[in-house]
Amino acid sequence: MKGFDFDFDFIKITATDVVDIFLVAMLIYYVYSLIKNTLAVNLLLGMFMILIFWFVVDKLHMNMLSTIIKKFMDVGIIALIIIFQPEIRRFLLLIGKNTFLQKNKAWWGYLFGSKTIEVNNLVRIRPIIEACKSMKKSRTGALIVFVKYYDDQLFANSCETIDSRISKRLLESIFQKNSPLHDGAVVISENKIKSASCILPLTDNDTLPPQFGLRHRAGIGISENTDAVAVIVSEETGEIAYAKQGRVRMNVSFGELEKLLNKDF
């Protein structure tokens, strides 16, 4: 079978090539995880179709049309940055949250006495849990957002500044139906209720269940665009949902809510 011998000497795979392929695969995975179930997928597909169309008209020597499309493609990088700004922001946040130090901060904290910090954190979380219990019982709709770093530019224009310590009564009074601040989100950061009545960006995800109202869509939307997590209390059912990184966990028990907040807050 001498005629079927193949020479694979031209294929030379080094350790660097393996690392290169792995990094490209990771990049594609992260990009896909960020844009799936969003309008960015349709935008990316549209740009890909324009690229194919330009290639075809260029090969057919349709000079006028090819020139117009080429001028459009010349500013493609700037257009990509503008169109995909939320996804780029989320990508950078994802990298920051998955660095070695961030991944292992729990171990560092444990070695240097995080047990005391954890106990104190549970004390800070308790008023939030108690407020959610009360609002669940009374079917009071609520949206509570937790951010690590308070972005004045993001929240200042659409919120009423509170800057008060966290308390059960204050949260209940804010979301009371007759309160002028109940329509919107409460933002908690640095162990304080920083602002209330915040208007948040809605999610672009068009696959969500139809029963999701504006609170759920706003909670998911803010978790998509920032490192925030959101607790949503449904006005119709009293059910508690937890949104993080664009994903929502439904029917969360108070024990689960305490564990989630202790981990993320």
Image (cartoon, rainbow, N blue to C red):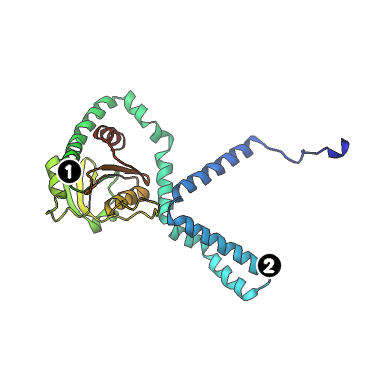
119 on left or right of 52 = left
The amino acid sitting under disc 1 is Met
- Report the residue marked by disc 1: 135
Quarter of the image with the C terminus in it: top left
92 on left or right of 236 = right
The amino acid sitting under disc 2 is Lys
Residue 50, compared with residue 11, is above or below; it is below
Q: Earlier in the sequence, mark 1 or mark 2?
A: 2
Q: Which numbered marker is on residue 15?
A: none
Q: State the residue in front, 114 or 201.
A: 201
> In the structure shown, which secondary structural element does the residue marked by tag 1 occupy?
helix
Distance from label 1 to label 2 (Cα)? 65 Å
The spot of residue 104 in percent (x, y) is 39, 31
The residue at the point 18 percent across, 46 percent down is 139
Q: State the residue in front, 197 or 216.
A: 216
- Report the residue marked by disc 2: 59
The residue at the point 42 percent across, 56 percent down is 85
Q: Which residue ends up furthest to the bottom in the rendered image?
A: 64
